[in-house]
Amino acid sequence: MTMAILIFIAAGLAEIGGGYLVWLWLRESKPLWYGVIGSVILIAYGIIPTLQSFPSFGRVYAAYGGVFVILAVLWGWVIDKKTPDLYDWTGAIVCVIGVSIMLWAPRS
């Protein structure tokens, strides 16, 4: 379980970090190299989830979506200095519960 969580976190940081660099390049007129590095990081994001041991592509990506939500809220808080409100945290918790059900519910 620890490895699955670490892989999800690595994928999330790659997706958010890469996307953020592209955002800065296109929306905030940062130099082209921000976009290039961001794009390379986004390619890495596409590879990282394939390291999961879960057999179902759809289930892995759906579960990752919940982890992404948590990381995005935290990124906004730490990097963008936008304090999450009660609804941000409530939604993030709902996502984590959903991820847990999807990945670890007993199946026959």
Image (spheres, rainbow, N blue to C red):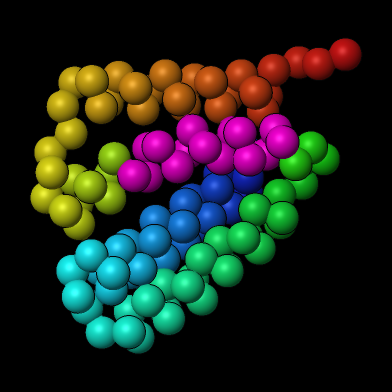
Viewer-closest of 13 and 2: 13
On the image, the x and y values in percent for residue 20 come to 32, 62
Asked if residue 24 is positioned above or below residue 61 in the image, the reply reads: below
Is 39 situated left or right of 55 in this image? left
- Examine the rendering and report whether any part of residue 104 can be seen: yes
The residue located at (56%, 27%) in the rendering is 99
Looking at the rendered image, the quarter that the C terminus falls into is top right
On the image, the x and y values in percent for residue 97 come to 49, 20
- Examine the rendering and report whether any part of residue 2 can be seen: no
Tell me the chief SS of the magenta region.
helix
On the image, the x and y values in percent for residue 102 come to 65, 23
Q: Which residues are magenta?
A: 58-72
Asked if residue 60 is positioned above or below residue 76 in the image, the reply reads: above
On the image, the x and y values in percent for residue 49 come to 65, 53
> Is residue 16 shown in magenta?
no
Is 7 situated left or right of 82 in this image? right
Count numbered badges in the picture: 0
The residue located at (19%, 21%) in the rendering is 86
Asked if residue 102 is positioned above or below residue 72 in the image, the reply reads: above
> Is residue 66 shown in magenta?
yes
The residue located at (19%, 45%) in the rendering is 77
Asked if residue 46 is positioned above or below residue 62 in the image, the reply reads: below
The residue located at (55%, 48%) in the rendering is 8
Which image quadrant is residue 18 in? bottom left
Looking at the rendered image, the quarter that the N terminus falls into is top right
